[in-house]
Structures are given as structure tokens and as C-alpha cells.
Image: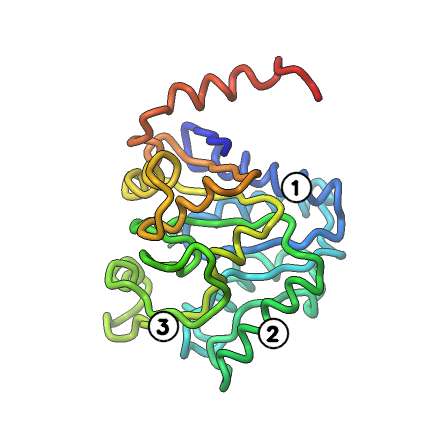
Amino acid sequence: MEVIIKETYDEMSIAAAKSVAQVLNTKPNAVLGMATGSTPLGLYKELVRMHKEESLDFSQVTTFNLDEYVGLPVTHDQSYHYFMHENFFKHVNIPRQNIYIPSGTTSNYEAFCQWFEQRISELGGIDVQILGIGSDGHIAFNEPTSSLSSRTRLKTLAKQTIDDNARFFDKPEDVPIYAITMGVGTILEAEKLLLVANKKNKAWAVAAAVEGPVTSMVTASALQLHPNAEVYVDRDAAGELKMADYYEWIQKMKPGAPQR
Ligand code: PGA
């Protein structure tokens, strides 16, 4: 796992966006795994800037989103369909038919989840999966005790996640309780994982994911099982990392490392 600590949110977002752009530059028809939440907004803003100012091309790209709330229509301003359209898709040139987001309104969740997984494999798998992390250590909506080999499925959200999300809704009772989410096993099959985290309230989850035991109690700790995982954090989110000096030393020494 590579841990990249940046002083600010903007620096963190730019570094993470560069890593995504690198994949696109070597594979223009890459399959991108997208995440929602407030953390990846800076990363998306930078990718949009690269598209507008540096001709970063998305015309052959396919995307799969991690998750969606159950019960919210795609037009609801808190649905992840709406979020992705507003914050990313409407600003870049990804063909509409190449965008896959789990459905929160399907009549058959089991069949939908199976189809979603099947589409990911038919398209050759995800090249780079962007991830946020919940304050309880979840990735996507894989709440504590989700199997580390879980697949796309319907999930009941944890109380802490519902409370964390309440700030986006008018009334607490409007916060969805169920979601459809890629599983940890689905996520681990991506070629590269790229997790972003900022702010102090993520410091515990980041330390547990990077330095704690691999456990379904912190599903982000499954990144330790992945051969190509990058974790981008700002100084606040890095606050509880015991090995922070070592991670910074590695980054500093990287340019001089022997080339393969
Ligand atoms: P956030 O959500 O980026 O809004 O903090 C992260 C997550 O729960 O995955």
C-alpha cells in the first residue's frame, strides 16, 4: 500500500487526480470506478479542469459507481445519480451509455446486482477504483461486519452512516436506511484502488484501515490485501498514522529508487 500525505485537501485531490489521469493516458478506454461523498469532489474538479484545459479525454471511458441509496429517484438531489451528473458527468465527455450506477429504484435488487457484476466483468473489470472512507471505516456502503468477499448487494446502513449523512437531508427521517453497494470482493478485483480521505474525523478510520488488523469491522482494511492500493490523505486525516514519517520518507526517496 502506498500512503501519500499532503498538507491540504487541494494538494491531496490534485495528486489523486494525477494518478487517475495516468491510467487514462496509458489506457484511453479505461474502466473507472467512481465514488460519491464530499471527499472526492476535489479530485473530480481537478479531472474536469484537466479535461477542459489539458484535453484529458473521456470519450472511450466506461464508469461504474460504487453505490446508490434505495428509494431515491434519480432526480432527487441527494441521489448518487444526481450527484455524479452535477459534479462530474455533465462536465466531461463520457458517452451516456458508458455510465453505470446501481439502481436504487429497481423492482428486483437481486437480479439487478447480478447484472451489474456481470457488466463489470464483460467490460474487462475496473482499472482504477476511486474510494472514500466512512468514519466507521467503511468503503462504499460495506458497513462493519460486511464480508471481505462480499459482492454487489442490498445493504442496511449502520446508524453512524445514517447520522453522518443526515446533514444532507432536510429531516432525519428522510435519510435512506438501505443502499445497493458493490461488495468488498468486487472492489478488491479492480486493478488499482485509490482511496481519498481528509479532515480529522477520518483520522481513526484511516489509521485502522492502513495500520490496523485486516478485519470486516473496518472494511477499508481490506486494501491491505490489494497489490496496488494508493491512499491519499491530508495532514488532518493522517493525524493518527503511527508510521507517517516512514510514508513521507518513501515518497521523498521515490524519485531516486532503482527503475525496474
Ligand atoms: P464523505 O463520505 O466523503 O462524504 O466523508 C465518505 C464515505 O462515507 O465513503
In the picture provided, is 92 more to the left or to the right than 219? right
- Quadrant in the rendering for residue 146: bottom left
Q: Which mark is residue 115?
A: 2
Q: Is mark 2 within 8 Å of ligand 1?
A: no
Which one is closest to the eye, mark 1 or mark 3? 3
Give me the residue at 57% from left, 43% from top.
Answer: 46
Circle 2 — which element?
helix
> Where does residue 130 sit, x and y in percent of width and height?
53, 49
In the picture provided, is 165 more to the left or to the right than 183? left
Type of the residue with mark 1 = Ala
The residues tagged by marks 3 and 2 sit, at their Cα atoms, a distance apart of 19 Å
Q: Which mark is residue 93?
A: none
Q: Which mark is residue 178?
A: 3
**Number of dots carrying numbers:** 3
The residues tagged by marks 2 and 1 sit, at their Cα atoms, a distance apart of 28 Å
| Contact? badges 3 and 2 (CB < 8 Å) | no
Within 10 Å of disc 2 (Cα), the crowding (few <14, some 14-19, many 20+) is few
Q: Which mark is residue 21?
A: 1
